[in-house]
Amino acid sequence: MAQDQYFFTVEVPDEVRAAHKQPGQYVLFDVGDDDKYPMHHGESGWAGTITNRPGRKVWEFLVKDISARSKVISSMEPGDEFRISLPKGEGFNVREYRDMHILLACCGVAIASMRAIVEEILTSRKDWKDVYLFYGERHLYRFAFSEEMESWHSDDIKIFRSASKPDKESWRGNAEYIQDYFYREIGHNINLGSETIAVIAGKPDMVTGFADALNRWEFKGNISFLNR
């Protein structure tokens, strides 16, 4: 896993696991002391996107150790018990869009949602046309799931990554915001017609910027936003 990031699994009862309906849903972890930590959309707890597709026996999570609340999660030990909510949010029902092109765009920890969607697609890859993943991070060491992406690539998931502030001595890829990379280099080479659905998640500036880049290329499909 990337630097300052933690990947962990949670065993949940069958009746709780059954509530996980769509990739992209999240849960709230009870970390205690609500007065100490800021609220998440009016709700208490650390919000973590389930990074695997529905139907798995465990739930997997990616946490970046960058806030007081996430540090509580990253400091947990194997066997620790805690309370979590049922899955929240609509997620993204990618199976509604079989026989279409899928364009996924994200930055930072929002890759968690995209991993779940890709997992769902890979259960029956032939059911979709082209699948694109655009993934931006600030630094090379921040990219998560790099080894898995090699496998995704072999399953015909077209992956484009960009680091906005890389160490130029160690990074040989594209060096700009992912939305700018898409607009400048990629948009004119992929199908952006009505048979394409775009899913965008990440920080507000990236989400707005990527949607604007799509519109500048006269994108004819629908856009779904997965921000928590």
Image (cartoon, grey):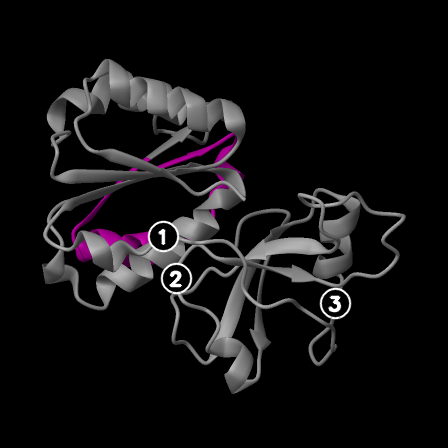
Query: Which region of the structure is painted magenta?
Result: 133-160
Residue 33 locus on image (x, y percent): 88, 56
Labels 2 & 1 near each other (Cβ < 8 A): yes
Amino acid marked by disc 1: Phe
In this view, the residue in front, 78 or 85, is 85
Q: Is residue 171 above or below residue 80?
A: above
| Residue type at numbered disc 2 | Gln
Name the mark nearer the viewer: 3 or 2: 2
In front of the other: label 1 or label 3?
1
Regarding residue 164, the answer to whether it shows in the image is: no
**Residue on which the image places disc 2:** 22
**Label 3 amino acid?**
Met
Residue farthest along the bottom direction in this orientation = 14
Q: Nearer the viewer, residue 197 or 178?
A: 197
Give the SS element for disc 2: loop
Give neighbour class at mark 3: few <14, some 14-19, many 20+ (Cα, 10 Å). few
| Residue occupying image coordinates x 84% and y 61% | 32
Q: CA distance from mark 1 to mark 3?
A: 29 Å
Q: What is the x, y in percent for residue 11? A: 57, 80
Mark positioned earlier in the residue sequence (2 or 1): 2
Q: Earlier in the sequence, mark 1 or mark 3?
A: 3
User: Taking 80 as reference, is 88 above or below it?
Assistant: above
Give the secondary structure at mark 3.
loop
**Residue behind mark 1:** 92
Q: Height in image: 83 above or below 111? A: below
Q: CA distance from mark 3 to mark 2?
A: 27 Å
Residue at image position (10%, 61%) is 126
Neighbourhood count class around disc 1 (C-alpha, 10 Å): few under 14, some 14–19, many 20 upward: many
Residue 60 is a magenta residue = no
